[in-house]
Structures are given as C-alpha cells and as structure tokens.
Amino acid sequence: MPTAIAVTSADLVLPPTDHQTPTAALLHAPEDQPLDAAITDMSVLLEQHGYVVALYPASLPAAHERRLYTIRAVLESDRIALLKLDLPPLGVAVLARQLRQLSICDFGAGIVACAARLLSHYVHAGALLGSVARLDRIPVSLKTHAKSWMPGSQFGVLANPRPQLIRIGGGELSGPEYATQLVLARGQLESEWVTGTLAPAWHVQHIHETPLPADSARWWGTGRLIEFAAFLADISVLYQLVSSVRREVCTWCGIQLIGDRCGFCSAPLTAASSRTGAPRALTAGP
C-alpha cells in the first residue's frame, strides 16, 4: 500500500490529477474530534499503509499541533512524520497533492517525507491582495503600508520560494523558469490580473480554480484576495527530481532519506554524510 498522506483541513485536499492519485487522510482539529477517535483513526492508517506523512501549515493553531504530537506519543510510533510547512494554505495543498502523486511510486516513506522539502522550492505560492495593512508574513515597508490605504490599490505578493511584493502596475513578480500549471482560489476580490497578466508572464500551461481555503484570509491578513500557486504537475518530472537526489540512511531511525534531515525523526545527517553533497534545490531557500 502507498504511504498515507494526511492534512489538517479538508480544503487542503485538491482534486486528484488522475484516477491513480490517492486522496489524503484528514487529521481533525481537537474541537471536531475526541482524542480517542483521533488515535483510533491514526492506528487504522498505520495498519493500512504502514507509514503516515502528515503535512500542516506553520499557521496551524497550537492546540491542533499539540494534538498531532500527542497522537504520535500515545501510539509510540516512529512511522508518523509530522511536517510543518511555512507555506500559504494553497501552497500546502499543492505540495500535499504532489506527495500523494509520489506515494504510489517506488519510493519508501522516508523519501516521500523528505520530498516535501525538495518540492517546496518549486512551488511559487502567492496572492493578489486588496490590502497589505495586516500582512505580517512578508516584509512590508511603511511606504507600501501607506499606499495600501489608497482606494483601488492592489498588490501582488509572492511568499515562496522567495518573498516579493509589488504594487500592481509598478513591477512584476518573479516566476518559475520552467513549465508549470497554476491553481487559484478567489476570495472577496474581483480581478483578472492572475489569469490575464500573471499566468501569461509565467508561461503557465494550464489554470485550475478551487475554493479558497478557510485559513487563507487569516494567513494573508485580508479576505480581499485571490490566492495562487504555480507548481510542477507532471508526475514524471516530480519522479525525476526526487530520483536524482542522493539517498542516505538515517543514523537515528534507520529509514532511507534524501537531503540533510530525516523527515520522520528530524535527525540531521552526520557530518560525514553531509559531505556527500546534495542538489542545490535542497539547500537553496529564501
């Protein structure tokens, strides 16, 4: 059975790219499910799939994050990977779907978990905002804050892979230099800038729309937004990226990994292993 991919909100489960891509399991918030039931559900996942890779945004409420660690502690399992992602909600959803695609390939659970860090460098996640007055996850200058109060002002913001902020009509967002598809989710903002300007400038091959994740307005500081994420959709490209990285064995838990840190126990590679080198994509970041 493929490694189970789990997320913390139903709106982080994007439609599958094909009939083979499995869905993701849902790890409910404490107020939505008793602890005993959550433990039982996780036990079933482990029994059916062997390993669980759970992705959750860094903006997840503290109580929900504690629930995840409590479940793992109660089960005393080293087969549950908890991956906190510093991505906007739609970016998390895109990455979760990519791992769902990879889960049916011939990769072990450790490789799938570590692939999240690798592939995150290829997700261009951002939003078109009607205001940046309450945006606190991207650096915003005082001058830009002041301009956000001007009627009709709109801003293009890139949160990943490198933060960037522009005023619409006064610059361009840096996009990917390779073929991507784009998913967008509309909030309370009317604009065709994403589909009419950004997508052509980024040479996007296909555009998909999805409902706005519930946490997006809080993440971006406003409900007047259109969130978007450009991503690699071709499973053969994803497979080649992951396959091209040197594989190591975690000296702590013994699982196979790529990169410089285990996705399950978070142990770093030893100094000797680190000297083997890894693709620049694994270490380059904001």
Image (spheres, rainbow, N blue to C red):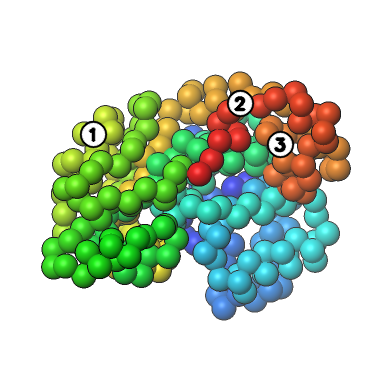
**From mark 2 to mark 1, how far is it between C-alphas?**
27 Å
x, y percent for residue 5? 59, 48
Instruction: Give the mark nearer the N terminus: 2 vs 1.
Output: 1
Residue type at tag 2: Pro
Q: Which mark is residue 280?
A: none
> Judging from the image, what secondary structure is the residue with disc 3 in?
loop
Quarter occupied by the N terminus:
top right
**From mark 3 to mark 2, how far is it between C-alphas?**
11 Å
The residue where tag 2 is placed is 279
Dot 3, how many residues are within 10 Å of its Cα: few (below 14), some (14-19), or many (20+)? Answer: many
Residue type at tag 3: Asp
From what the image shows, is residue 115 above or below residue 244?
below
Residue type at tag 1: Ala
**From mark 3 to mark 1, how far is it between C-alphas?**
34 Å
Identify the residue at image location x=43%, y=28%: 234
Dot 1, how many residues are within 10 Å of its Cα: few (below 14), some (14-19), or many (20+)? Answer: some
Cβ–Cβ under 8 Å for marks 2 and 1: no
x, y percent for residue 30? 60, 75
The residue where tag 1 is placed is 201
The residue where tag 3 is placed is 260
Furthest residue toward front: 143
Instruction: Give the mark nearer the N terminus: 3 vs 1.
Output: 1
Q: Nearer the viewer, residue 99 or 273?
A: 273
> Judging from the image, what secondary structure is the residue with disc 1 in?
helix
